[in-house]
Amino acid sequence: MQKMSYVKRSIITAACVALCVILPMAFHSIQNAGSILSPMHIPVLLCGLICGPAFGLLSGLVGPLLSSLFTGMPPMAYLPPMIIELAVYGLVAGLMISLIRTKKLYVDLYLCLVIAMIAGRIVAGIAMALIFVPGSYSMAVWTASYFITAWPGIVIQLALIPTIVFALMKARIIPERYSEKA
């Protein structure tokens, strides 16, 4: 797989950050859509998978911050743990895609996504328990907020993100992971 230029990765990252602002606005008419469908997670995970860990981390830091500043979503009270969660998603997705090479694109993508999604939720849960609401955050609250409430978003991410990456490769917008000759 050939490497993408710094400029191309920067442009894709900027598009992902913009999607962090636009997607929540698109779902705003649905009550609690942010916590149920997690629309910001998609561009951050995509950015990490496509552009690598540094750009994924940047997308996870800047995307929710700009969204909050421009649209009020997420509200300031939820912003710090969300920035932590999304930054870990972008970072870990980028790290995993560089480490995992099964020679099967979809297996690589699903493994990277699952690992990044679990890591982000664990780190955000630890931050909630130790920093943001110490003493009043339980395993039950963590499970309910990061898994039970968010299950539709998790399903959407697992269905949509590998398909988007595959389509971008086929459209030659991003380099193919495995050449067809191999």
Image (spheres, grey):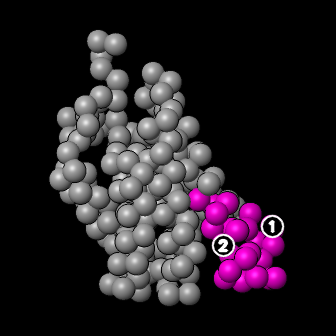
Q: Is residue 57 magenta?
A: no
Q: Name the residue type under label 1.
A: Met
Tell whether 148 sits left or right of 176.
right
x and y, in percent, of residue 169 in the image: 27, 34
> From the image, which quarter does the C terminus lie in?
top left
x and y, in percent, of residue 112 in the image: 52, 41
- The residue located at (45%, 56%) in the rendering is 90
On screen, residue 148 above or below 68:
above
**Distance of label 1 from label 2 (alpha carbons):** 13 Å
What's drawn in magenta, residue-wise?
120-143
Q: Are marks 1 and 2 in contact (CB under 8 Å)?
A: no
Between tags 1 and 2, which lies in front? Answer: 2
On screen, residue 77 above or below 124:
below
Instruction: Place residue 70 in its image quadrant.
Output: bottom left
Residue 158 seen in render: no
Q: Is residue 142 magenta?
A: yes
What main secondary structure does the magenta stretch of the protein show?
helix
Q: Name the residue type under label 2.
A: Ala
**Residue assigned mark 1:** 139
- The residue located at (42%, 73%) in the rendering is 64
- The residue located at (42%, 51%) in the rendering is 53
**Residue assigned mark 2:** 127
Instruction: Place residue 28 in its image quadrant.
Output: bottom left
Q: Nearer the viewer, residue 51 or 71?
A: 51
x and y, in percent, of residue 82 in the image: 53, 72
Mark closer to the chain start, 1 or 2: 2
Residue most extreme to the top: 181
Sort mark 1 into few (<14), some (14-19) or many (20+) by Cα contacts within 10 Å.
Answer: few
> From the image, which quarter does the N terminus lie in?
top left
- The residue located at (25%, 63%) in the rendering is 14
Tell whether 47 sits left or right of 147.
left
Helix, strand, or loop for circle 1?
helix
